């Protein structure tokens, strides 16, 4: 008999391309990175290294290195976390509706490795093309400055 695999009942969500065990993630990530990326934690507001960063470049998933966001979609939301009005590509992230805590929130995870990135909010009135705010933990991202990316 094969071992029983417990699958979460997700619908319409592409499978992660990068799959690692809890132990492998723990070895690769710092404790804070692990907490946010793999346990859906949230870094404290105004403490992340990219909150106010304006450097031109691409933000990659810190867990699997997939390209997620571009600096030209980043804006100053003053919410305490890096904020983007759109992901780099529609299929770069997966949005999961979360109805716990009596409120509707939409979790954003990396489509490539299903690590937690943050949440997306909409209709807040920010002066952006989408009226959406991808509120992402700095610790979930690695910024690759443009000079390097063009090599
Ligand atoms: Zn990832």
Image: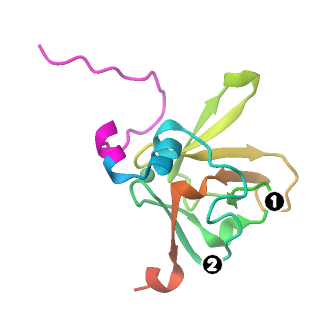
Kindly identify which residue carries mark 2.
Answer: 55
Asked whether the beta carbons under mark 1 and mark 2 sit within 8 Å of each other, the answer is no
Q: Residues within 10 Å of mark 2 (few under 14, many from 20)?
A: some
Q: Is residue 9 above or below residue 146?
A: above
Residue located farthest toward the top when viewing the structure as drawn: 1
Q: Residue at x 85, y 57 (%)?
A: 126
Task: Give the label on residue 78, or none.
Answer: 1
Q: Nearer the viewer, residue 14 or 40?
A: 40
Q: Position of residue 25 (x, y in %)?
A: 35, 45
Query: Is the distance from the Cβ of mark 1 to the nearest ligand 1 atom less than 8 Å?
Result: no
Q: Is residue 121 above or below residue 72?
A: above
- Counting residues from the start of the chain, the first of labels 1 and 2 encountered is 2
Q: Residue at x 75, y 21 (%)?
A: 102
In the picture, measured across the screen, residue 47 lies left or right of residue 95, that is right
Q: Position of residue 110 (x, y in %)?
A: 49, 48
Q: Position of residue 38 (x, y in %)?
A: 46, 40
Quadrant showing the N terminus? top left
Q: Position of residue 115 (x, y in %)?
A: 46, 44
Does residue 17 show up magenta in the picture? yes
Q: Is residue 141 visible?
A: yes
Q: Is residue 17 visible?
A: no
Secondary structure mostly seen in magenta is loop
Does residue 50 show up magenta in the picture? no
In the picture, measured across the screen, residue 100 lies left or right of residue 143, that is right
Image: magenta residue range: 1-26
Residue located farthest toward the right when viewing the structure as drawn: 125
């Amino acid at each position: 008999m094969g071992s029983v695999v417990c699958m979460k009942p997700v619908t319409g969500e592409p499978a992660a391309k990068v799959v690692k065990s809890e132990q492998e993630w723990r070895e690769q990530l710092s404790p804070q990175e692990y907490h946010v990326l793999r346990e859906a934690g949230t870094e404290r507001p105004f403490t992340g290294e990219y909150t106010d960063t304006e450097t031109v470049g691409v933000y990659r998933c810190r867990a699997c290195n997939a390209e997620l966001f571009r600096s030209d979609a980043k804006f100053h939301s003053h919410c305490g976390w890096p904020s983007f009005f759109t992901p780099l590509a529609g299929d770069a992230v997966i949005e999961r509706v979360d109805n716990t805590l009596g409120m509707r929130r939409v979790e954003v995870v990396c489509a490539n490795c299903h690590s937690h990135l943050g949440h997306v909010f909409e209709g807040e009135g920010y002066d952006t093309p989408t009226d959406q705010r991808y509120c992402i933990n700095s610790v979930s991202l690695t910024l690759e400055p443009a000079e390097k990316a063009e090599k």
